Image (tube, rainbow, N blue to C red):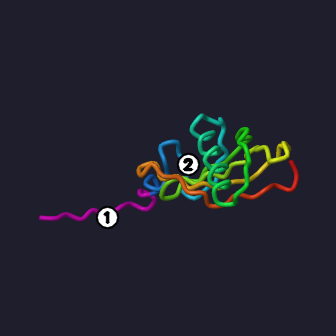
């Protein structure tokens, strides 16, 4: 035996929001850079180095934004030191699938101004 229940308009809106009332797809600022976010930033630098052959050294995550999708996208402004010792800022985007414990570097670009 099966049953069918019709949802009221707007009833399913709660299904597209996380418990903190953040909407899926919207970029939200990261209020506090946690150790988890720092590790994502460190991963982004290591993965970039592996893909590009560069030897950047991670310093810190300066700020960032997160976007809820089927997982979480992180857009981070990262400070890293290059081969000649100059600190520079980079923007990295990392896709996080926590249930699979995987991260994927989507992009990593130097910023024109620090």
Which residue is tagged 1? Answer: 6
* Above or below, 87 relative to 1: above
Circle 1 packing at 10 Å, graded few (<14), some (14-19), many (20+), is few
Asked if the residue under mark 2 is in contact with the one under mark 1, i.e. CB atoms within 8 Å, the reply is: no
Circle 2 packing at 10 Å, graded few (<14), some (14-19), many (20+), is some
Residue 31 image position (x, y, % from top left): 66, 38
Report the quarter where the N terminus lies. Answer: bottom left
Q: Residue furthest left?
A: 1
Residue found 47% across the figure and 56% down from its top: 16
Closest to the observer: 36 or 27?
36
Asked if residue 18 lies left or right of residue 106, the reply is: left
* Above or below, 80 relative to 73: above
Instruction: Indicate which label's residue lies in the foreground, 1 or 2.
Output: 2
Residue found 74% across the figure and 40% down from its top: 62
Residue 50 image position (x, y, % from top left): 63, 56
Which residue is tagged 2? Answer: 22
Asked if residue 80 lies left or right of residue 103, the reply is: right
Which element type, helix, strand or loop, lies under badge 2?
Answer: loop
Residue 57 image position (x, y, % from top left): 72, 43
Give the magenta part as a residue range: 1-12
Rounded to the nearest angstrom, the CA distance separating label 1 from label 2 is: 25 Å
Closest to the observer: 29 or 15?
29
Which numbered marker is on residue 91?
none
Asked if residue 25 lies left or right of residue 100, the reply is: right
Does the magenta-highlighted stretch encompass residue 48?
no
State whether the magenta stretch is mostly helix, strand or loop.
loop
Residue found 65% across the figure and 45% down from its top: 41
Does the magenta-highlighted stretch encompass residue 7?
yes
Residue 67 image position (x, y, % from top left): 59, 53
Decide which of tag 1 and tag 2 comes sooner along the chain. 1
Closest to the observer: 9 or 1?
1
């Amino acid at each position: 035996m099966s049953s069918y229940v019709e949802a009221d308009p707007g009833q399913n809106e709660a299904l597209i929001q996380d418990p903190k009332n953040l909407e899926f797809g919207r970029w939200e600022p990261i209020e506090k850079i946690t150790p988890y976010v720092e590790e994502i930033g460190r991963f982004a630098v290591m993965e970039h180095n592996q893909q590009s052959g560069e030897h950047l050294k991670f310093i810190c995550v300066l700020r960032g934004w997160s976007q809820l999708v089927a997982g979480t996208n992180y857009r981070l402004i990262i400070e890293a030191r290059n081969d000649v010792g100059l600190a520079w800022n980079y923007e990295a985007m990392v896709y996080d699938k926590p249930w699979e414990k995987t991260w994927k570097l989507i992009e990593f670009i130097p910023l024109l101004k620090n």
